[in-house]
Amino acid sequence: MGSEGFLQDPSSKETKRFHRDEKSWLRDPKVFVDTGIPIPGEPPLLKTSVHLRRDAAEQLWKELHRVGWQQVEPCWGASAEP
């Protein structure tokens, strides 16, 4: 997953952005998981954001991938900026 990654449900286009919580990474690694829908030419419609321990975030990533979510290019956030 690296420091940031995106998974998208192909049927609904709902997207999850997984990104490190840099403030906690060294002592107690945690990951923010933001859920939203990208809207071309506009900011994404963000629905939720959760803060998970690294192992829980990795499990969620693997489970979503297993049920058909696909890794996509960054849709929003710092890495999506031109």
Image (tube, rainbow, N blue to C red):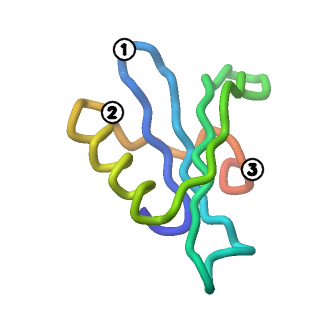
Question: Is the residue marked by circle 2 packed among few (<14), some (14-19), or many (20+) residues within 10 Å?
Answer: many
Farthest residue to the top: give it.
Answer: 12
Residue located 38% across and 58% down the image: 58
Residue 12 vs residue 27, the one in the foreground: 27
In the rendered image, residue 69, in percent from the top left (x then y), is placed at: 33, 33
Q: Which mark is residue 69?
A: 2
Q: Is residue 65 above or below residue 53?
A: above
In the picture, the disc for residue 11 is 1
Q: Whole-Å distance between the Cαs marked 1 and 3?
A: 25 Å
Q: Nearer the viewer, residue 39 or 58?
A: 58
- Give the side of residue 81 with respect to residue 60, left or right: right
Above-or-below relation of 3 to 42:
below
Label 3, on which residue?
81
Disc 3 marks a residue whose amino acid type is Glu
> Pointer 3: residues within 10 angstroms few (<14), some, or many (20+)?
few
The numbered mark, 1 or 3, whose residue comes first in the sequence reads 1
Q: Is residue 82 above or below residue 37?
A: below
Across the whole image, how many numbered discs are drawn on residues? 3
Residue ID at (33%, 53%)? 59
Say which label, 2 or 1, has the lower sequence index: 1
The disc labelled 1 sits on which kind of residue? Ser
Q: Secondary structure at mark 3?
A: loop
* Category of crowding for the residue at label 1, using alpha-carbon neighbours closer than 10 angstroms: few (below 14), some (14–19), many (at least 20): few
Q: Which residue lies at the image location 62% right of the left edge and 44% below the top edge?
A: 50
Direction from residue 70 to residue 17 in the image, left or right:
right
Q: Secondary structure at mark 1?
A: loop
Q: Amino acid at mark 2?
A: Trp
